[in-house]
Amino acid sequence: MFKTILLPTDGSELAVKATEAAIRFAQVHGARIVSVCVAQPFPFVPATDNAVVPDADVFETQIAATAKAHINKIEIACATAGVPFEGIVVSSHTPYKEIVAAAEKYNCDIILMASHGRSGLSKLFLGSETQKVLAHTTLPVLVLR
């Protein structure tokens, strides 16, 4: 039933647990894993010429390298478990859109992702990429806590 699993990752502890579950899920279903890590571009544009800001190119290079490292860890875990794997890194200010787009592009049957379980005001103001994915995809989404 599930032949291609999309596994979004941000490298967090919960994402590592989701990776372990996704690998077991893939083994049971004889599926492959496509993992996506969204590197968010430099978030700040100075409004004045006198502003002192970090170097955006250095920031984006480091973020992309970190995202690639997260994907590499999943690739190694999948190879060890004998699970076919494809990893992608994309750059975007809207991770949920990239996750939904990757699921469509790679013909995924399910999205398996971690939930950070925010509550209270942080949930209200920050929202949740998981919640946004749930709202914008028609695929089944397995949320792990």
Image (cartoon, helix red, strand yellow):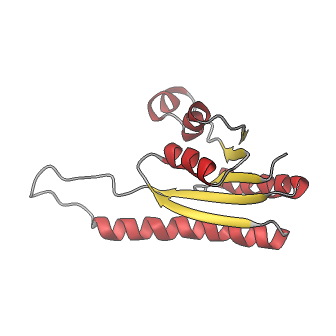
Residue at position x 53%, y 64% from top?
67
Could you say which is closer to the camera, residue 4 or residue 92?
4
Instruction: Count numbered badges in the picture.
Output: 0
Q: Relative to 88, is 6 above or below?
A: above
Q: Quadrant of the N terminus?
A: top right
Q: Position of residue 99 (x, y in %)?
A: 57, 48
As drawn, the residue found furthest toward the right would be 28
Could you say which is closer to the camera, residue 137 or residue 39?
137
Residue at position x 72%, y 73% from top?
76
Q: Relative to 119, is 81 above or below?
A: below
Q: Position of residue 54 (x, y in %)?
A: 27, 64
Relative to 64, 135 lies left or right? right
Residue at position x 48%, y 27% from top?
124
Relative to 28, 101 lies left or right? left
Q: Position of residue 62 (x, y in %)?
A: 43, 69
As drawn, the residue found furthest toward the left would be 49
Q: Relative to 63, is 106 above or below?
A: above
Q: Quadrant of the C terminus?
A: top right
Q: Quadrant of residue 55?
A: bottom left
Could you say which is closer to the camera, residue 29 or residue 81?
29
Relative to 64, 130 lies left or right? right
Q: Quadrant of residue 13?
A: bottom right
Residue at position x 44%, y 30% from top?
125
Q: Position of residue 135 (x, y in %)?
A: 58, 30
